[in-house]
Amino acid sequence: MGGMSTPRRRAVPVLVLALTMAVPVVTACTSAGSAQSGSSGGPAAGSGAGGNSASPSGGGSGNGSAGASGPIVPTASSLRWSECTGQYRGMQCANLRVPLDYAKPGGRSISIALTMVPATAPKSEQQGVMLVNPGGPGGPGRGMASWVAQGIDPGVAAKYDIVGFDPRGVGGSNPSLSCDPNFFAGARPDYIPTSAAEEQQMITRAKDYAAGCQQRYGWLLPFMRTTDAARDLDSIRAAFGVSKITYYAFSYGTYLGQVYGTLFPGHVRRMVLDSTVDPTGVWYADNIAQDYAFQGRMNAFFAWTAKYDAAYNLGATPDAVRNAWYKARGMLETSPVDVSGQPQIGPDEFDDTFLQGGYGNWLWPSLARALSDYLLNGDASALVSAYQANGVQVENEFAVYNAVQCADVNWPRNWSKWQADTEKVYKTAPFEAWDNAWFNAACAFWPVTGPSAPMQIKGDGLPGILMLQGTLDAATPYAGAQDAHKALPSARMVVVQGGGNHGQSLADPPNECVQRYLNDYLADGTLPSASGPVNATCPVTADPTPGG
């Protein structure tokens, strides 16, 4: 449910805002080394952004060799760019047609929506194309190009064509997957079942959602695996006419990068993996590992709130704050809070909202204030604001989340195993246990059967890779990130000791130590020189204060 990540959460700090608010304007002049802007085209389906379509010559079977040669800076791109409109104004937009099924490149095609902040440095100083991905699966990525361009050193950003994209099935890409548009309408049944009948109700919801996906988009579902998305990455590379790309990603995007590097090692110039997915646990075991890790972050939130009892009056001990939180949850089960005239915030929506605090502690002050106002003053306005900012589910993102994870690898098909595993987790990590089980439950009934085991990630032929990781990250736990490190012998990991936020780079406030490693690597490939599983360390940034 979390942080590969689930649709409702964005992979990294600030990106929550960048993807839901108008993207700040960025100068979008096209440099001599960038793909040239074309005439204005019609908007992609549902995108609100201009852009013309092109077809790739890459993707293929995934045999990029370590000796791939050719230009790094685009000189013969087939992409036709136009100025973006709407929320992506200030960037350039395009659409790329790719095969639905890469085994049949001349068959049916779909489109991938792209954005770009072009390089502005002289052509002789440019370093080519940097593809960026915020995570998911299901997370829209077009807004990330602007965010990365503003977040890294300006001198480094100027040397790259920074390219964001909505992966297949997501957002402005066409088709935009939807299985049940009303799935999140109104307050949902409580995640935590108290009877066999309540559990069966949730099982039926999961079955119906899977069936709805098959009915509406059965032709698309077999081609929504991470391997398909990785081949789309290579199609983007080929459309730029370059031999290699730089790839910078967070959360689930790090798994997409691992798969891309395994399929196309010779097409990788540089790669940054921030908050890395464990490739050995994809996806059932990874989700269980998250349950325990998110409990740790929720406990940290309770302790932080207790520390500032003078501000929130919810109790001076973690246990007291925990009791207050569960009291509020019970009240919402009995009387959900209305939003726009209908009951909307029940216990599930409450969980969804506070889960975001497990991704980023910058939310703790607003979440604690919402809880305090609701319990002590009967004022739900701050809770509604927190839900609207952080807890609202987007069904398209949820649909793609399921379509990818359910098909990447086969999940247990016997519900009794899910039930037994969830009950075991619930005994010591109750916060996420049932929430996570139901968020993934459609995979028990998914119409597409995945491979019996996760794809084996191989690091052969890859250049040096920079990994950034917090030791207390809940969405991509530290032990799993080290499993990925073992599979990627050319990688070097910078560890933030005590870092619990999901996404260590481009944070607000920034971790200057992490930013230095990131900018140095993107500038010239510099990596930490120490050997072993931890190649460098950075101190954690301070927790927020009630006024922060």
Image (cartoon, grey):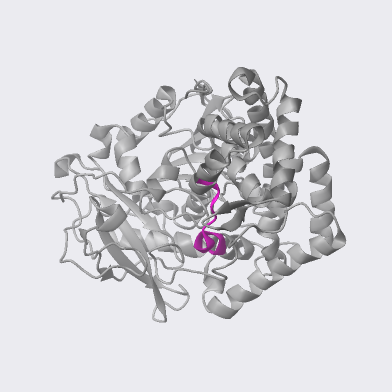
Task: Please tell me whether residue 396 is drawn above or below residue 521 in the rendered image.
Answer: below
Q: Is residue 250 left or right of residue 311?
A: left
Q: In this view of the protein, can residue 413 be seen by the observer?
A: no
* Foreground residue among 266 and 355: 355
Q: As displayed, is residue 293 above or below residue 333?
A: above
Residue 183 in view of the camera: yes
Residue drawn at point x = 48 percent, y = 50 percent: 257
Snapshot quadrant of residue 523:
top left
Residue under the image location 74 percent in, 63 percent down: 202
Residue 484: x, y in percent? 58, 42
Which percent across, then down, holds residue 125?
Answer: 19, 39
Q: Which residues are magenta?
A: 390-399
Image-based side of 238 in relation to 512, left or right = left
| Residue drawn at x 60%, y 37% as measured from the top left | 358
Q: Indicate the quadrant where residue 409 lies.
A: bottom right
Judged left or right of residue 511, residue 386 is right
Residue 43 at what x, y percent from top left? Answer: 28, 68
Q: Main secondary structure of the magenta part?
A: helix
Residue 105 in percent (x, y) is at 41, 76
Above or below 415: residue 160: above
Number of marks present in the image shown = 0
The image quarter containing residue 510 is top left
